[in-house]
Image: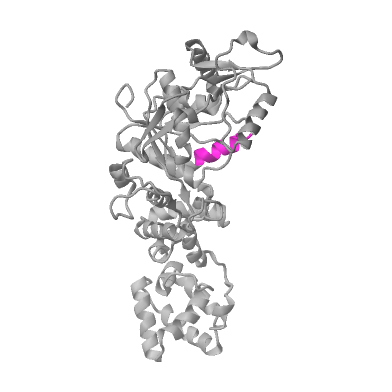
Amino acid sequence: MSDTGQVITRFAPSPTGFLHIGGARTALFNWLFARHHGGKFLLRIEDTDRERSTDEAIEAIFAGMKWLGLEWDGEPVFQFAQQARHREVAEHMLASGHAYYCYCSPDELTAMREKAKAEGRPMHYDGTWRDRDASEAPEGIAPVIRFKAPKDGATTIKDTVQGDVTIANEQLDDLILMRSDGTPTYMLSVVVDDHDMGVTHIVRGDDHLTNAARQILIYQALDWAVPEFAHVPLIHGPDGAKLSKRHGALGVEAYRDMGYLAEAMRNYLVRLGWSHGNDEIFSTEQAIEWFNLESIGKSPARFDFAKLEHVNSAYIKEGADEDLVAALAPLLESVSGWRIDSALRNKLLQAMPSLKERAKTLLDLGKGAEYLRSSRPIEIEDKLAAKLTDDARAMLGRLSTVLSDLTDWTTAAIEACVRGFMDAEGLKFGQVGQPLRAALTGTTASPGLFDVLATLGKEEALSRINDQTK
């Protein structure tokens, strides 16, 4: 806990690309844990890799988190801006004897690397300058600052997810804290930033598990409190392989553009590696109430588009019509090129109860609503055009006459009128429905016919029918 007893978590992405699914889940877990405890969720941009970090990536991270509803507390911290503080800590460690200058030349380091390779072991710095005086330094070599790690004993990571993980200190060599150009390394920067930000719980991918042992040693050397760790297994694809773009390792904005709802994405992502009994569909409020680190599984979760679609369709079916239109309209404008005025927005709202019954994504809603913006004469899919035989066109003409006398233009009244016409003519629904759908929408992807007639309005609906009777 922090000095105030408050839980503080952080999400610390590198701005070298979009906010991908794995990062989004890490952010979500940290956000949920902080909100569950009434604590703080902080954001740190680890932009020390100046060549690969971009403003576009930073904005993509901000936009992705805001779309997911993962609002952070306070202003984002930019790691590069903290370099003077990182250097100050490194110099403090030099003064306390926990770090030293290393003057190894590139050739010496290459020789160590080649020797390790020949012996079939990982490259470990051999401690050449660990106990030597700087007066022995060769000319022309800009030194690095290395951490003087303990050589005996072991370091135990007390991990909420992985359990206790113990690593022999002899496996943890004297890592570099400051490079020869005076810039801090990741290992130092992370420890200093997490300490200065008051982070109490570090929730991140288990690919950082070994890093945790090295970072614990730095905390101990500085006599700082060690945060609690929770290293979460990475997400795999449905085939069990590491998640890649072919599995769905896309930026969260790609899922937004594919028509997934932010609240559905939150629900799906939290269930990737965490569970609450058999609950599958639950609100964000419930997730905050239930979330804990102990219920995170030790095995990698598998990303599954079919399950994501299932969750999303459930949220669409239960969503308020006004909220769905609010989410759908900008997506149709940006992705599908729609121009939505107030009249079309009202029609979308009127059509939403029937549109959302079969939709898995917002784009499905858009496909189902395509008939609303079709201009006359509408284009008809070849498959449906075949249904408009001479007999079918004549039948539509008679139906139009009957519908024109209808004064109550509501779904229920329209259905009663059409079914009465079918009974009078001795026709089955398919004989009327397919030609009628062709005339009204030109496509098979539309809601129920009676809802279509009601939403189009009497004048437009009859005009479309009459276009096919000429």
Give the magenta range. Answer: 52-63
In depth, the one of 17 and 366 nearer the eye is 17
Q: Measured from the top left, where is residue 265 in percent x and y? A: 42, 50
As drawn, the residue found furthest toward the bottom would be 426
Q: Quadrant of the N terminus?
A: top left
Residue at screen point 62% across, 36% down:
117
Residue at screen point 39% across, 54% down:
322
In depth, the one of 34 and 169 nearer the eye is 169
Q: Measured from the top left, where is residue 457 in percent x and y? A: 44, 69
As drawn, the residue found furthest toward the top would be 135
Relative to 263, 64 lies left or right: right
Dominant secondary-structure state across the stretch colored magenta: helix
Tell me if residue 61 is in the magenta stretch: yes
As drawn, the residue found furthest toward the front would be 119
Q: Measured from the top left, where is residue 232 in percent x and y? A: 41, 42
Q: Is residue 340 visible?
A: no
Q: Measured from the top left, where is residue 323 in percent x and y? A: 39, 52
Relative to 165, 38 lies left or right: left
Relative to 147, 451 lies left or right: left
